[in-house]
Image (tube, rainbow, N blue to C red):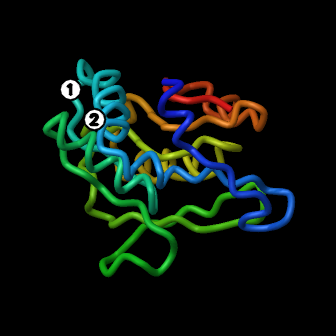
Amino acid sequence: MERLKAKIRDIPDFPKPGIVFKDITPLLADGPSFRTLTDALAARFASRKVDLVVGIEARGFVIGSAVGYVLGAGIVLIRKKGKLPYKTHKAIYQLEYGTDTLEIHEDAIKPGQRVIIVDDLLATGGTVSAAIDLVNKLGGTVVGIGFLVELTFLKGREKLREQEIFSLVQF
């Protein structure tokens, strides 16, 4: 996993002063690294009988789609407010630098479907907590959550104590 970590670059003061953005695009652009991250996340959840992978906008779409493909599972998109064309449910949540809203199509998950949530980064846990709320609202069962990166100093994992969390790289 050190090879993956080395492919992630820091962008200081983005999106605002004091934030160090973890840019995963160099890792995604490297085929062997992208394969390693996809295979590692998929392997972690392969025994869970996953029906759907929920990808959170936007980098979670890329990673979640690849993991869903490996697992033979469908992909469900959770997007920022106003980006989905059909009827939606929404959840408002705290970011480390403000608030935001996520939405999911109201028919995206059927009651009882087994879901994993995949995103690029776990920071404070607000975004993924909102995603969990949306999955639960539709009757899905979250059977795991996977991240490429976890910023351990922000203690986002503490908000998710009832969930199984897996991250490939920690900062």
Give the vertical position of 167 relative to 10 (above or below): above
Q: Distance between the residues labelled 1 and 2?
A: 7 Å
11 or 58: nearer the viewer: 11
Give the vertical position of 135 relative to 92 (above or below): above
Residue depicted at 51% across the width and 75% down the height:
81
Lower sequence index among marks 1 and 2: 1
Judging by the rendered image, the residue that carries numbered circle 2 is 114
65 or 128: nearer the viewer: 65
Residue depicted at 56% across the width and 35% down the height:
6
**Is disc 1 in contact with disc 2, using a CB cutoff of under 8 Å?**
yes
Q: Position of residue 15 (x, y in %)?
A: 72, 67
**Label 2 packing within 10 angstroms: few (<14), some (14-19), many (20+):** many
Q: Where is residue 55 in the image (x, y as percent from the top left)?
A: 38, 52
Give the vertical position of 23 relative to 98 (above or below): above
Amino acid type of the residue tagged 1 in the rendering: Lys
Q: How many labels does the image show?
A: 2
For the C terminus, give its image quadrant: top right
Query: Dot 2: what SS?
Result: strand
**Label 1 packing within 10 angstroms: few (<14), some (14-19), many (20+):** some
124 or 106: nearer the viewer: 124
Q: Position of residue 11 (x, y in %)?
A: 69, 57
Judging by the rendered image, the residue that carries numbered circle 1 is 49
